[in-house]
Image: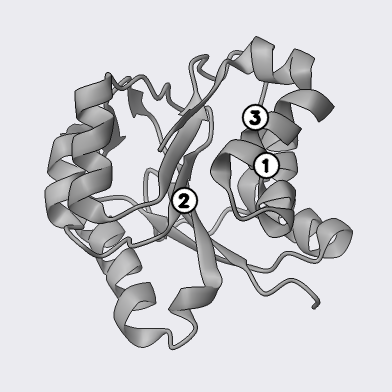
Amino acid sequence: MENSQFIFCLEAVPDIENTTKTAVIKNLENLVFEEGIASIYKTCDTIEGLVDGLNALLYDDHNFKDYEIIYFVMPGERDSICLNDYYYSFQELAELFEGKLKGKILHFANAKIVDLNEDEAQYFLDITGAAAVSGYGVEFNNVSSNPLDKAFFSLCQEYDDVTEIVEELHQKHYALCKLLDFRLYY
């Protein structure tokens, strides 16, 4: 593979023991074949599973530096995620991953809205060390973010500056960006 950047995907599922092949897995497989972008996919059904998944990547994978994007596919509300019917705020997530996401882009599929005010976004970025948080202002409503996610991931391979990525994304996919209300906090 020519690209040296990979995607680490964590998808919230009702029960990790159920091994149903989700649409996310199919889209990640297509991303490998169509764009040459490799990924690791894990499911979680609790906050402990989410922490364990990221910790395994942080501490057990010697190629962690090659994972530019951490892709979250999980329900929630504007400033929280939902796992096992419990909501975790971005502030709680920031404290869980304090200093562990240096330089990473955290991208949320439109299974949830990402709507942070400036202080919330800056706190999250400062505490975790993440380069950016991206997502959508429109939750899944018969319009999946998968095509725009794929375009975003592809552009992340081409550009290092997140503002260039967003500009190019809007130039190439303006209607979909507007429809899903693509957002980036950096």
Q: From mark 2 to mark 3, how far is it between C-alphas?
A: 17 Å
Can you see residue 142? no
Residue beneath the point at 37% across and 50% down = 15
Between marks 1 and 3 in the image, the one whose residue lies nearer the viewer: 1
Residue beneath the point at 43% across and 57% down = 104
For the C terminus, the image quarter is top left
Q: Nearer the viewer, residue 147 or 104?
A: 104
In the rendered image, residue 176, in percent from the top left (x then y), is placed at 73, 18
Q: Amino acid at mark 3?
A: Ser
The residue carrying pointer 3 sits among few (fewer than 14), some (14 to 19) or many (20 or more) residues within 10 Å by Cα, namely many
Between marks 2 and 3 in the image, the one whose residue lies nearer the viewer: 2
Q: Secondary structure at mark 2?
A: strand
Q: Amino acid at mark 1?
A: Phe
Q: Is residue 97 left or right of residue 7?
A: left
The residue at which mark 2 appears reads as: 105
Q: Amino acid at mark 2?
A: Ile
Q: From mark 1 to mark 3, how far is it between C-alphas?
A: 10 Å
Give the answer, above or below, for where 179 lies relative to 15.
above
The residue at which mark 1 appears reads as: 152
Residue beneath the point at 38% across and 74% down = 57
